[in-house]
Image (cartoon, rainbow, N blue to C red):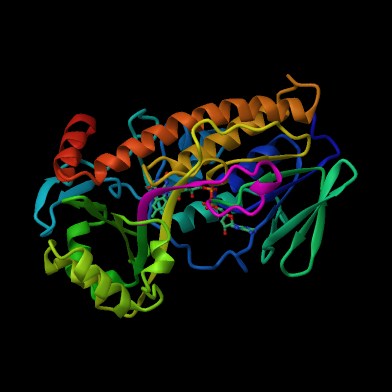
């Protein structure tokens, strides 16, 4: 195998990096994952994730992890309720039975980010995870790399995979192609102990997801298994709005002042997001890469997931990151190529072409989701695509 006697370093222990580590270790490769989080027990940010048959679930099947997934996913959490600006329900899937057949091609089972991370880490060999290792730089060392971390440590690898997500610092050693602001910004957050801290919204979510769409704006809520309510607003905002607006996103009152003005045509039901102090807010401007991005493949460095092809959320990002891992592992381990560079080139060609198509789809979807009559778009979309 091309990776015999080689050290592989994956920068970033998100879903893409972790499943790649698992798949490569199944083939006998020497792999370390360098993650900036201080340890495994850092509270995982972000909404729940729905995994898809041909992508995220395929990766878990190939990693022998479907049973671990079955023990940790949340049957019923995939059920969606669509409301308007006043939290009036226009559509709900709560009369549907929870999905239990993970082999169903239409299955979209939901799992929280924490349990997904935990089950992937549990599948790795002891000592694979190197925590508290914030990537800083790469220096050439022979045919490989010295990897430098913010904490002053370093490590050698023959092959490095940049899996460090949307704000990747490792991607620039492959290409200087810059990301483009999409025009959309998310304010994401989490309400802990939501049954107590946001009882009405918790009830509306009912263990699933709420998509509230009205007049060019949206709020998405998802219930998480540990009892918190993840939420995000998505609106059209100018480039650099996050820094130029003067809003202090660490200050609840500052965000609430913005919300009341920006969502002034929405009802007060949503104000419950701002009641408790047991919550946080993060501003995430949404970017994408040019659909025609391409580069010359390197001998010892490649990229996957959001670091390669982030888009505004369209429910597919984690799935595409995990599919990248499957296809990269296959190229590196299937003996079809004479060199690592040939294997990387084969993987990157397919990945970039797929990324171009998913970027188009994601941008079209988010344009529709924030169109003037976006509630109609959502209702028509679910009428067409619901398999409950
Ligand atoms: C609000 C929101 C909702 C979303 N909803 C969905 C959804 O429903 N379905 C879906 O499929 N996708 C969704 N996405 C997109 C999805 O989260 C990403 O596409 C997915 O997480 C990408 O996986 P990844 O492994 O490439 O990167 P990430 O999950 O971002 O993981 C990157 C990892 O690298 C680490 N890291 C970062 N920088 C460094 C560094 N310098 N050194 C070391 N480690 C580093 C991070 O801590 C992290 O662990 C959503 C995104 C957002 C913002």
Residue depicted at 83% across the width and 40% down the height = 6
Instruction: Measuring from the top left, give residue 148's x and y in whole percent.
Output: 77, 60
Residue depicted at 38% across the width and 46% down the height = 313
Looking at this view, is 365 or 385 the one in front?
365
Q: Is residue 365 above or below residue 171?
A: above
Looking at this view, is 69 or 374 the one in front?
374
Q: Magenta segment: does it hold 173?
A: yes
Q: Answer left or right for 217 relative to 111.
A: left
Residue depicted at 17% across the width and 48% down the height = 82
Q: Is residue 165 above or below residue 299?
A: below
Task: Please identify the quadrant where the N terminus is shown.
Answer: top right
Give the extent of the magenta segment.
166-185
The quadrant holding residue 22 is top right
Instruction: Measuring from the top left, give residue 296's x and y in whole percent.
Output: 70, 31
Q: Answer left or right for 75 relative to 306.
A: left
Q: Answer left or right for 343 relative to 244.
A: right
Q: Magenta segment: does it hold 334?
A: no
Q: Is residue 380 above or below residue 371?
A: above
Instruction: Measuring from the top left, give residue 381's x and y in whole percent.
Output: 21, 35
Can see residue 387? no
Q: Is residue 149 above or below residue 74?
A: below
Instruction: Measuring from the top left, give residue 333's x and y in whole percent.
Output: 72, 29
- Name of the residue lying farthest toward the right: 142
């Amino acid at each position: 195998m091309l990776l015999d006697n080689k050290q592989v370093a994956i920068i970033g222990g998100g879903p893409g990096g972790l499943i790649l580590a698992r798949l490569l270790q199944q083939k006998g490769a020497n792999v370390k994952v360098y993650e900036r989080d201080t340890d495994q027990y850092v509270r995982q940010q972000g909404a729940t994730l729905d995994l898809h048959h041909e992508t995220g679930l395929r990766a878990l099947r190939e990693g022998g992890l479907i049973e671990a997934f079955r023990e940790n996913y949340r049957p019923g959490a995939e059920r969606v309720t669509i409301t308007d600006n006043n939290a009036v329900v226009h559509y709900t899937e709560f009369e549907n039975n929870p999905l239990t057949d993970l082999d169903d091609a239409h299955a979209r089972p939901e799992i929280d980010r924490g349990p997904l991370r935990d089950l992937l880490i549990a599948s790795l060999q002891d000592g694979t995870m190197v925590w508290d290792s914030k990537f800083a730089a790469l220096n050439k060392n022979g045919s490989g790399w010295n990897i430098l971390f913010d904490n002053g440590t370093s490590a050698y690898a023959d092959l490095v995979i940049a899996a460090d997500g949307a704000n990747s610092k490792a991607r620039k050693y492959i290409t200087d192609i810059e990301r483009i602001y999409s025009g959309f910004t998310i304010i994401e957050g989490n309400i802990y102990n939501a049954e107590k801290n946001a009882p009405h919204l918790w009830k509306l979510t009912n263990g699933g997801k709420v998509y509230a769409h009205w007049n060019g704006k949206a709020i998405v809520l998802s219930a998480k298994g540990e009892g918190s309510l993840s939420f995000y607003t998505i609106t059209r905002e100018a480039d650099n709005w996050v820094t130029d607006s003067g809003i202090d996103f660490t200050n609840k009152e500052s965000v609430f002042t913005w919300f009341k003005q920006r969502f002034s045509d929405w009802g007060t039901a949503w104000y419950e997001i701002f009641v408790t102090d047991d919550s946080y807010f993060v501003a995430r401007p949404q970017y994408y890469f040019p659909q025609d991005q391409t580069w010359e493949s390197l001998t010892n460095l490649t990229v996957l997931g959001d670091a390669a092809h982030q888009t505004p959320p369209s429910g597919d990002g984690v799935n595409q990151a995990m599919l990248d891992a499957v296809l990269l592992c296959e190229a590196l381990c299937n003996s079809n190529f004479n060199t690592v560079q040939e294997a990387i080139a084969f993987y990157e060609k397919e990945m970039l072409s797929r990324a171009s198509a998913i970027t188009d789809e994601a941008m079209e979807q988010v344009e529709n989701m924030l169109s003037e009559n976006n509630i109609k778009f959502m209702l028509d979309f679910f009428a067409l695509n619901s398999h409950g």
